[in-house]
Structures are given as structure tokens and as C-alpha cells.
Amino acid sequence: MRRAATRIDGLGTTIFTEMTALAARTGAINLGQGFPDTDGPDSAIEAAVAALRGGENQYAPLPGVAVLREAVLAHQHDFYGLEPEDVLVTFGATEAIAAALLALCNAGDEVVVLEPFYDSYAAAISFAGARRLPVTLRPPDFALDAEALRAAIGPRARVLLLNSPHNPTGRVFSLDELSAIAQACIEHDLVCISDEVYEHLVYDGQHIPPATLPEMAERTLTVSSIGKSFSFTGWKIGWCSGPAELVAATRTVKQYLTFAGGTPLQHAAAAALSGARGYLPGLRDELRAKRDHLRTGLAAAGFRPLRSAGTYFVNADVGSDAVDFCRTLPERCGVVAIPTSAFYDDKTAAPTLVRFAFCKHDATIAKAIERLATLRPHQ
Ligand code: PMP
Ligand code: GLN
């Protein structure tokens, strides 16, 4: 009998796919997978239609279409004062991260990751034949323990894979925390792959790209995408920028993974990015209000929501095993959510936490709260 390669054994279906399928099957409200139920700016949709009608329908150049590459460079400069040497357009942030790991890691190398971490990280690290070195962030604050970070770094560590603002905790790492990370990268000569897909979804505090810290621009590959900043998660247009050598290595892998496409959407993404200053404050205010709505509602419903400074997510303590809780939630009250332990290697770190997405219509959030209130979890 033919068998799949051992490298993909055990990866299974993503928790997001599973939970969205469960919501569809049961008709439950889906606060699991993080995607908005409202589209991004009309002007970007019009730009996509114009590109489709205007003959932008063939392969893109491997590095991405010029207007989008220029828009990303302008964005990095405008928002953060960064001047990356090069930029590569990818199939979402996911491809940029996977291609970078494949490019930078040899079999047996080690990748430092703060857990909980986004699920594609573990898969991409294993595709590269590398090993992950988790540094555990613990509730309720999910603060980085600089000592634990130092202790985690092994002899073959090559990369530190960072995500701030952070899925699933909603943390936006502080300057102190990022400085400790920078120090570790410099001391151990690590490349920092910085996943900043939620860079503009910050409600309290400020997003600090690690590339802006001293001696970090030359060792950081900054990754982002159109999905969260402009509510177009299905477009899957992403990019990475940074030192020429890191971008070139990532481009070499990307060339053989997927080559280059999504050409009309690359043009539309350029249009969206050029309108960022006008669009983003409104989106941020809307999402902040949704976060507050969900947190207040969860607290009133007897849950114990934690703080969330950014992203689409609030975590709440349900006072019992979160995996069991989520598994039976659709049938008990018609809501889908994700056990936060799905993002941890260490399943004991947050066994009673559940992640809820708030990037949904206010009426949907209100309905979900009403349903959840019938459970009174801590009583
Ligand atoms: N990184 C994080 C932390 C995410 O939450 C997500 C998606 N939800 C991604 C990467 C993937 O981004 P994209 O859709 O642009 O591939
Ligand atoms: N990032 C989204 C989340 O955390 C899901 C993306 C996906 O389904 N891969 O919910």
C-alpha cells in the first residue's frame, strides 16, 4: 500500500478548517476561524475588477508586480521609517513564512517560537526538517519571560519566528519584550522572521516592528499581508521585506513552490495599501468597539475574558477543559470557538482558555453572547 511521507503524518486538518466545517454543519455562529464578515474598501474591489478587465491576467513577475512592491516599500517607510533593501510578494503571509523557513533552515536546525503560536508555523518548521524550540507565554498576561527565552535557545538555533500583534493571545509585545528578543537574536546570530499580519489591528498601545530596533534591520525578514489590514483574507496577497540576501533566499524557494500569480489582486492590493492612511483608522475603531462588545458580553455571561490589545481575538477562561467545552459548544448553544491549547505544544499551559473571534457583525456578536449566557460556565 502506498503511504504518505512521514513528514506530514500527524499534521491532520487545521483546527480552523475543522471548526468552520463544524459551524457550517451545525448552523452555529462561527467565532472560531478569524475572518471578518464584512468586505474591505470598495475602491480596492474596483481596482481588482479594473485589473481583471484590463488584461492583468497572466503570471506576475516572480518578485511581484512593480506597483505593489513599491506600495509595500512606501508603507514600511511611511509607517515605521524602515527602508528594506528588497521585497517579495507571496501567496499570503503563510507562503512567505514557509518559504523563508525552507530557505533559511537546514535539516536539524532549530527555530525559536513563542507559544501559543499560529498553527502553520509548526507545519512549516517540520517541512524544513527543522525543530521548534518553544518559549511558553502563560495566561493571564502572556508576558515574555526573558530568562525562559535565553534558556530555550539551542546550539542549532538559526531563526526566531515572532508574531506581534500576537494570535491567539491578542498581545502586542512591549519595547522591553522586543528588546529582549532583539538581544537574543543578536547574541545567537539568529534571523528574526517577524509575522506582522495584525500590524494595523492594535487597540491599546503601539505596534513596534522588530526591524526598527538597533542592529535588527539587517537580520529581520518582515512579513505581512493584505488579509487583516484590509479585510480581504481570501485574497491571499502577502509579502516579505528586509535585507536583500534574506529576500533573495525566500524568493528562490517561492519560485519553485508556486511561482507568481494572483496578478489582478496584486494590483488591487497596491491600491488598498496606497489608501491605508484614510482607511485604517476607521477599521481600527470599528474592531476596537467589537472587542469591547465581546469582552463585556462574555464577562456579563459569566465568562472570564482576558485583555486583548490587538488582533481579532479575545480569550476567556471557561473554568473547565476547553477542548471538551468547544467540542460540545455548537450543540449546547449554537456557537463555535477554539480551545487556546490548540496553539500550544504544552497542553497544560492554558487548559481552560477558549479563543473567540470578534471580527463579526455586531448583531452576530450580540446573538453569540445571548447564546453563551445560557451556559453560566463558572457556576
Ligand atoms: N500569521 C498569523 C499570526 C495569522 O493569524 C494568519 C492568519 N490568519 C496568518 C499568518 C496567515 O496570513 P495570510 O492569510 O496572509 O497567509
Ligand atoms: N488566522 C486565522 C485564525 O487564526 C485562520 C486562518 C486559517 O484558517 N488558516 O483564526
Image (cartoon, helix red, strand yellow):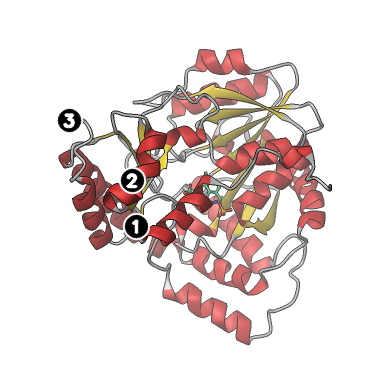
Rate crowding at label 2 as few (under 14), some (14 to 19) or many (20 or more) other CA atoms within 10 Å.
some
Numbered circle sitting on residue 329: 2
View extreme (front): residue: 1
Q: How far apart are marks 2 and 1 (CA)?
A: 9 Å
Q: Residue at x 62, y 64 (%)?
A: 68
Residue type (three-letter) at the residue carrying disc 3: Gln
Q: Which of marks 2 and 1 is nearer the N terminus?
A: 1
Residue holding disc 1: 28
Numbered circle sitting on residue 91: none
Q: Picture quarter containing residue 185?
A: top right
Rate crowding at label 3 as few (under 14), some (14 to 19) or many (20 or more) other CA atoms within 10 Å.
few
Mark 3 secondary-structure assignment:
loop
Q: Which of marks 1 and 3 is nearer the N terminus?
A: 1
Residue type (three-letter) at the residue carrying disc 2: Leu
Circle 2/circle 1 CB separation < 8 Å: yes
Confirm whether residue 269 shows in the render. yes
In the figure, is residue 350 to the left or right of 296? right
Q: Viewer-proximal residue, 324 or 338?
A: 324
Q: Picture quarter containing residue 313?
A: top left
Circle 1/circle 3 CB separation < 8 Å: no
Circle 2/circle 3 CB separation < 8 Å: no
Residue holding disc 3: 379
Q: Viewer-proximal residue, 234 or 76?
A: 234
Q: How far apart are marks 2 and 3 (CA)?
A: 17 Å
Confirm whether residue 309 shows in the render. no
Q: Picture quarter containing residue 242?
A: top right
